[in-house]
Image (cartoon, rainbow, N blue to C red):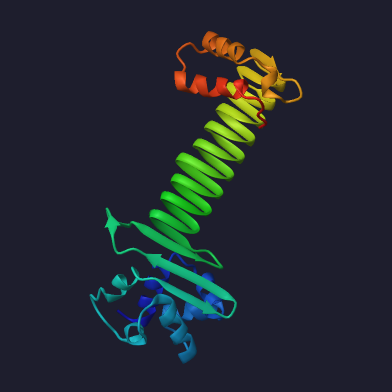
Amino acid sequence: MQFADKMQKLRKERGMSQENLAEIIGVSRQSVSKWESGQSYPEMDKMIALSELFNVSIDELVKDTSGSTGSAQNIHNSYVINVGSQFHYEYKSKRTLLGVPLVHVNVGRGIYVAKGIIAIGNISIGVVSLGVLSLGLISLGALAIGLLMALGGLAIGTISLGGLALGIFAVGGLAIGMFSIGGCAIASHIAIGGYATGHIAIGESATGAQTLIMQHNEFNSINGDQVRSLINQEYPNLWKALVDGIVSMFNSTSWNP
C-alpha cells in the first residue's frame, strides 16, 4: 500500500476530515489533499507529527506494503497528541463485541467520532454514549438521541430529560411527549407543568379535555387522590407503577418542574 493510500485510510479510520487533519498538523487542507493524492510528501516534522497522531512508525507510513494488517491493529492503542494549541486523545479497546470496540474514546479540538459499546467523543455512537452529539441506547450530550434514555440540552428518547425533551416520557423546560412534565408541558396523554396542554392537563395554566389547576405552581395544592381518580377515569388500563409515580408528586410537600 502506498503512502497516499495509507494516509487516507488512517484518517478515515479516525473519523477525521482533511480539514481536521490539516488543523491538527498545522498545514492547509490542500497540503493534506496533495499527500493523499500522491502529488507530494510531508516534510520531516510533519511526518513525525503524522506518525505520532496515527500511532505508527514513519517506516510503516512511507514503506510500500501490501496486505499488511499492522496499521489496523495499531488503532486499538491509545494516543495523545498536542500539536501547537491542538489536543487529541483516542483510545480503542482491543476487546470487541460483534466487531465493535467495547470502549472507544475519541476527543479533542475538532470533529472526532467515537463508535463503541461505550462511546465517548465529540460525536459518539454507542450503546452508552457521551458527547456533544450523542446517539445510543443511553445517551448524554448537548444533543442526545437515545433509544431508551436521553439526557441533554436537546434530548430525544423513550425517556428524555433536557432543556428541550422529546419522548414518550419527557421531562424538561419544554417537554413534549405522551407523558410530559416541565415548565411548559405538551402531551397526548398527561401533561404536568407551569403551562400544561394535554388530554389530562395539570398546571398553573392548563388546557385539555380534563384539567386540574395548581395554585402558585405548588403540587401540594392538588390532592393526590383526585389525580389518581382522574387518571383511572380517563386511562383505566394505564400501568399502575406509572400512575403511582405521578400521584406521588402531588402527595409530596412540594415539587416544582
Q: Position of residue 165 (x, y in %)?
A: 58, 37
Farthest residue, direction left: 67
Q: Is residue 152 visible?
A: yes
Q: Residue furthest front?
A: 253
**Residue 172 as seen in the image, left or right of residue 114:** right
Whether residue 144 is situated above or below residue 238 in the rendered picture: below
Residue 239 in view of the camera: no
Residue 180 percent across, percent down from the top left: 59, 28
Image coordinates for residue 153, horizontal then vertical, percent: 61, 46
Q: Quadrant of the C terminus?
A: top right
Q: Is residue 110 left or right of residue 221?
A: left
Please tell me which residue lies in front, 3 or 235. Answer: 235
Residue drawn at x 33%, y 68% is 76
Query: Relative to 204, does residue 105 appear above or below in the rendering?
Result: below
Which is more toward the observer, 10 or 196? 196
Which image quarter: residue 177? Answer: top right
The x, y position of residue 223, in whole percent, is 64, 14
Instruction: Name the residue rendered at 67%, 23% in the picture.
Output: 219
Residue name at image x 45 percent, y 44 percent:
138
The quarter in which the N terminus is drawn is bottom left
